Image (cartoon, rainbow, N blue to C red):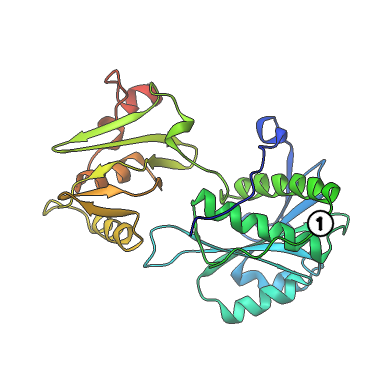
Amino acid sequence: MALQTQSINPAIQMNRPQTIQIFLPDGSPRSVKIAEITNRVVKSILVPRNKIDYISSRDELRNVGVYFLFGESEDKAKPIVYIGEAEDCLERLKQHNRGKEFWNYAIVMVSKINAFTKSHTKYLEHIAIAQAKEANRYETENFTIPSKPFVTESMEADLLDSFDTIKILLSTLGFPVFEKVSKEQITAKELLVLNGRDIKAEGDLIDDGFVVFKGSQAKKDTVPSCHDYLIDLRNKLLQSEIIKEVNGNYLFTQDYVFNSPSTAGGVVLGRSTNGWTKWKNRDGKTLDELKRK
């Protein structure tokens, strides 16, 4: 069944400068972070899983909000997110600390002026899950999209504004759950190509890695000297059905973001490779020439 999601117009603030304040309550840059856009009403609290006891001594999470659990799995090629809402987010995180294994970080979104109600967070949860599944950057642990609760037209406008703030804060904290990548977003001149024997792959260097676009091909076989990490990643991509065998090679069934051009090139060619020199634009200039010289 096709995924039905509500169309959301891009927010103006996504395309203009923002001032984001990040507060470290215990002084550690690797611990709890409280982030907010200075002129918006939503604030985010990032909590490493091992800091549940510490955050329990504070009041930020004892509030109505929507939350995101982030982690990874040895069997999945993509990072994982679970999205939920609660009237007391601290108690809900404690429940998930006992009951869910995969997550390492939680990010909780609450209102700085305590304006969120249960209806607000149910609506934000609905939109967040639908948009996360549509963006497809993360493996979404939510198997279904909850039904959209009734909200007034004016309330919906305010909540969509809050959701745009949530998207910015999540990306700022390193979790671009809602940021889509697609070939249509770039020009033919910017498109990078890697050619091998009987295969062709297309991609682009983006802010958080290198994306190989849907429809790209990869060699089915690896060379004997191929590093284990490339073999393991290819197996994860197969298990996650991000690539599948077609006519003796592999085909990318969706866009996929690798951590570097070389990892992307290695997966495509089935061997270690320097992606900075292998990926080229239509004029034959390498990624190295385009971006590093």
Left or right, residue 171 beside residue 213 = right
The residue lying toward the viewer, choosing from 258 and 288, is: 258
The residue lying toward the viewer, choosing from 29 and 46, is: 46
Q: Residue at x 26, y 20 (%)?
A: 284
Q: Residue at x 50, y 71 (%)?
A: 102
Q: Residue furthest left?
A: 224
The residue lying toward the viewer, choosing from 139 and 33, is: 139
- Whether residue 162 is visible to the viewer of this picture, yes or no, is yes
Q: Residue at x 79, y 45 (%)?
A: 157
Location of the C terminus (image quadrant): top left
| Figure disc tally | 1
Label 1 CA crowd tier, 10 Å (few <14, some 14–19, many 20+) = some
Q: Residue at x 23, y 57 (%)?
A: 231
Q: Residue furthest bottom?
A: 98
Q: Is residue 265 above or below residue 15?
A: below
Q: Position of residue 110 (x, y in %)?
A: 78, 59
Q: Position of residue 252 (x, y in %)?
A: 31, 47
Q: Amino acid at mark 1?
A: Val
Q: Secondary structure at mark 1?
A: loop
Q: Position of residue 122 (x, y in %)?
A: 74, 63
Q: Is residue 101 above or below residue 113?
A: below
Q: Which residue is mark 1?
A: 151
Q: Position of residue 229 (x, y in %)?
A: 28, 57
